[in-house]
Amino acid sequence: MPTTVDTGRGHPGVVTGLPRLLLRSEGAALLAMAAVLYARQEQSWWLFVALLAVPDLGLLGYLAGARTGAVAYDLTHTYLPPAVLALGGVLGGSSLAISVALIWFAHIGMDRTLGLGLRYPDRSRHSHLDG
């Protein structure tokens, strides 16, 4: 059975210590990798800047409540959707789809580097990376 860490702030399951540092470092690595790969796509950097914050539209889900907000935010801040988009771009020969996926990955990497993680469906502002 998996164990969780109780941070003493009443929210079990929060990552602390070296694992937290490693997760933030992975975020920085993802951001750097996505930016370098984006540069190789020869798309406009204006597109990169314009779309970098788009995944945060998932926050609009909070208008429908905490649970819906957490699900919407998490779906726009997990690796699966941009991975599917990137794979579709590769298989379909769409450099635009690949570029958008790389921007999406960059956003997620940026958030993880800053310590912003996936949200819990309660009314707190806690994520899996903070306490």
Image (cartoon, helix red, strand yellow):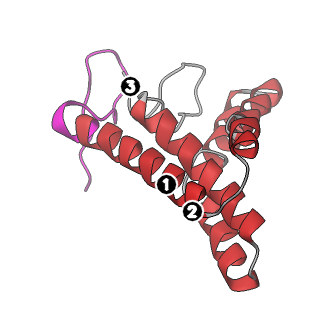
Please indicate whether residue 89 sits to the left or right of residue 32 in the image. Answer: right
Q: Nearer the viewer, residue 34 or 122?
A: 34
Vertically, is 28 above or below 105? above
Q: Residues within 10 Å of mark 3 (few under 14, many from 20)?
A: some
- For disc 2, the marked residue is 40
Magenta stretch bounds = 1-20
Please name the amino acid that badge 2 sits on: Arg
Please indicate whether residue 46 sits to the left or right of residue 125 in the image. Answer: right
In the picture as drawn, the residue positioned furthest to the top comes out as 9
**What's the residue at 26%, 16% (across, down)?**
8
Give the alpha-carbon distance from disc 2 to disc 3, as whole Å.
34 Å
Can you tell which of label 1 and label 3 is closer to the viewer?
1
Pointer 1 with pointer 2, Cβ within 8 A: yes
Please name the amino acid that badge 1 sits on: Val
Pointer 1 with pointer 3, Cβ within 8 A: no
Could you say which disc has been placed on residue 36 in the image?
Answer: 1
- Residue 67 within the segment the image draws in magenta: no
In the picture as drawn, the residue positioned furthest to the left comes out as 18
Q: Please state, as top left, top right, bottom left or bottom right, where the N terminus lies in the image.
A: bottom left
Please indicate whether residue 73 sits to the left or right of residue 54 in the image. Answer: left
Q: Nearer the viewer, residue 76 or 4?
A: 76
In the picture as drawn, the residue positioned furthest to the right comes out as 64
Q: Earlier in the sequence, mark 1 or mark 3?
A: 1
Q: What secondary structure is the stretch in magenta mostly built from?
A: loop
